[in-house]
Image: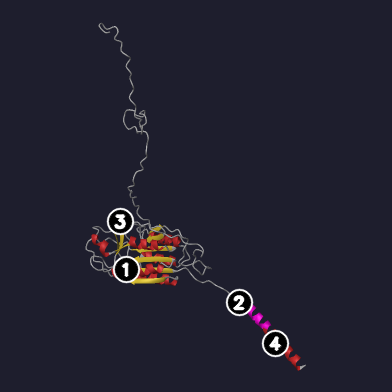
Amino acid sequence: MRYFIFLLMVLLNFTACASDFHTNSTQSRAVKVTTNTAQEQRVALVIGNNDYQGVLSKLSNPVNDARAIKGMLEQRGFRVIYNENGTKRGMKKSLDEFYTSISRGGVGMFYFSGHGIEVDGQNYLIPVDAKIDAKSDTEYEAIALNRITKRMQNIGNRLNIVVLDACRNDPFSRSLGKGGLAKVEPIGMFVSYSTGAGSVASDGRAGGHGLFTESLIKYMSQPLDLRDVFQKTRKDVYVESNQKQFPAIYDQTINGKFYFTPPSGNTTQTAQSKHEQPIVIRTPQPRQEQQIVNQPRYQERRDEPIDISPYPINRIPRKRTFVKEEEPEKYEHPPEDYSSVVGYD
């Protein structure tokens, strides 16, 4: 009897434990929530150059502008690579780090404020230690913009943005108001200048911000699409400069929208779906002429000669390959009759 009661108690305890385990497991499964808070990668390279040497004039506000852009981008989730008063070696090192970072995909932004020069249709960004005594030295002392845009294109991330507040007076021009940068339209990128191609922009009041960057920061902090940010910036700059400065916009983007500040109710970056692959942009390569390979001509065997003369010879009989030797004809002389000859017996 005692053995039976002991077995009964063991069974009741086991049933209760199993019930509690099932309940806890069900509750654990019910409260598990999987959230994906991963955002699209954002990387920016910001360079501001004030302290120029040699024939290039020192500038007042590029470093102030670069610092303000850096702070704005960091607040908007960008990882910022920053270079202030960059030498040629320092700018190249920052660019290499930038290329490596944006190769992981997402959005890349390049911002430069300082001196920029156009030479023979090519744009160059000037480091502070550039030794430029004549405009022809620019190619060797400065950094070509088209090399930067081509590298960014070939990496193939979703979106690339290039902003240049580098349209100051050309120090090698004989007249004021001459200079600016040449037009550029790389496929798959969004490019903006502080003023139109071939024009110059004001450096602004010392200790403040340039007119272009000041308006740009204003609209980057609002929930506007990338195009709207620069359209509104352009309008403000044009009005505030008394219609003397009109920022250039070269919109060649093809991979969706972008917000520096996402609209209200959207706490994550407005980007493409995970399953949608961005279109990879490649720099078009120059067309190469096809090399003609000398191949032996096909020689067709003909039984009849080809008529290439002005006189028809197509009626010439076919050439005989075997001729049977003809036997000579046999000729028999008739018997001679000499009976009519006198004296012939």
Amino acid carrying label 3: it is Gly
Amino acid carrying label 4: it is Asn
* Mark 1 or 4, closer to the camera: 4
Asked whether disc 3 touches disc 1, contact meaning CB atoms under 8 Å apart, the reply is no
The residue sitting at 44% across, 72% down in the picture is 75
Picture quadrant where residue 162 is located:
bottom left
CA separation, marks 3 and 1? Answer: 22 Å
Provide residue 16's location: percent of width, then percent of height: 69, 85
User: Which sits earlier in the primary sequence, circle 3 or circle 2?
Assistant: 2
Residue linked to disc 4: 13
Amino acid carrying label 1: it is Lys
Q: Secondary structure at mark 1?
A: helix
CA separation, marks 1 and 4? Answer: 74 Å
Q: Secondary structure at mark 4?
A: helix
- Left/right placement of residue 17 relative to residue 187 reads right
Residue linked to disc 2: 31
Residue linked to disc 3: 121
Q: Which span of residues is magenta-colored?
A: 18-26
User: Which sits earlier in the primary sequence, circle 3 or circle 1?
Assistant: 1
